């Protein structure tokens, strides 16, 4: 499965999602019955890491085995890890399933720079990254579980791109929408992305009203979650803000 054009990605949908938090997206997913969409343990590389929203381009690894543990594979342009660096489309997020292995760096400064220059939006992995000091200095969002000095081939063997993967215990399909901010990373199934992009801003707008009311001393009872009374009050507040 390697056709990145198989799914239509609406740029306006991405723009709307980029304006809301991962917390809001997670709530919207929960309301629809999706409980396992948060990549537990995957965090921004550093406090200044930018937020992002982008469709997923996936890379699957398996644990390295001694008979294939050879740095020479990195010189093969068809080796999936190298292929992913050169074929992840601009505007996409490279999602690297590292089997939650944090003993080897899945990406370093040179490969990250290649992705950045090619217009890739971000990198997400449940593994580690290396050259982390240089990565921090880049204007390129990286979300990972840890940092490690050894090269990827010391612990991982890349096997496929653009296939369903499990990353940090979450199922991710090519073209799913990834969103990352200071709270971490969530994945939106592609089929739900448009409706969540419609509803999530409304949730955040109501929560702005809630914060304003709480600041004035109002109880959260009957306010958060919403009640008929609070929704009526919200409608008046929203009209007054227009």
Image (cartoon, rainbow, N blue to C red):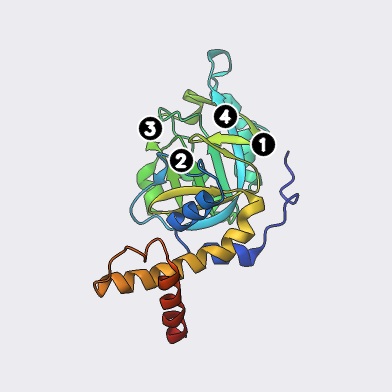
Query: Quadrant of the image for the N terminus?
Result: top right
Residue 149 marker:
3
Residue depicted at x 55% and y 46%: 33
Residue at 66% over, 45% down: 87
Q: Residue 88: image x %, image y %?
A: 63, 47
Taking the image as shown, residue 238 lies to the left or right of residue 12, namely: left
Task: Label 4, secondary structure: give it.
Answer: strand
Q: Is mark 2 on a helix, strand or loop?
A: loop
Rounded to the nearest whole Å, what is the CA distance between mark 4 and mark 1? 11 Å
Indicate which label's residue lies in the foreground, 4 or 3. Answer: 4
Q: Which circle marks residue 36 in the picture?
A: none
Question: Dot 4 corresponds to which residue?
Answer: 61
Picture disc at residue 163: 1
- Confirm whether residue 122 shows in the render: no
Work out how far the residue at label 1 is from the one at label 3, CA to CA, in angstroms: 28 Å
Structural distance between the alpha carbons of marks 4 and 3 = 18 Å
**Circle 1 Cα neighbour tier, 10 Å, few/some/many (<14 / 14–19 / ≥20):** some
Instruction: Relative to 239, say whether 57 is above or below.
Output: above
| Residue furthest front in the image | 228
């Amino acid at each position: 499965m390697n056709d990145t054009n198989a799914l239509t990605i609406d740029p306006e949908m991405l723009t709307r999602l980029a304006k809301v938090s991962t917390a809001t997206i997670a709530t919207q997913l929960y309301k629809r019955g999706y409980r396992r969409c948060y990549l537990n343990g995957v965090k921004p590389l550093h406090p200044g890491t930018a937020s992002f929203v982008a469709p997923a381009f996936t890379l699957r690894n398996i644990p390295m085995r001694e008979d294939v543990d050879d740095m020479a594979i990195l010189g093969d342009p068809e080796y999936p890890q190298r292929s992913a660096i050169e074929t992840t489309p601009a505007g996409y997020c490279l999602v690297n399933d590292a089997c939650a292995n944090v003993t080897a760096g899945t990406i370093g400064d040179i490969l990250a720079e290649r992705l950045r220059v090619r217009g890739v939006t971000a990198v997400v992995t449940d593994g580690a990254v290396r050259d982390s000091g240089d990565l921090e200095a880049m204007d390129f969002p990286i979300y990972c579980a840890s940092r490690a000095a050894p090269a990827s081939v010391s612990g991982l063997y890349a096997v496929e791109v653009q296939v369903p993967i499990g990353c940090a215990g979450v199922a991710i399909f090519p073209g799913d929408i990834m969103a990352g901010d200071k709270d971490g990373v969530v994945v939106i199934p592609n089929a739900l992305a448009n409706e969540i992009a419609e509803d999530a801003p409304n949730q955040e707008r109501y929560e702005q009203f809630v914060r304003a009311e709480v600041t004035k001393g109002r109880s959260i009872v009957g306010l958060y979650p919403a009640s008929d009374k609070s929704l009526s009050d919200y409608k008046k507040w929203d009209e007054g803000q227009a």
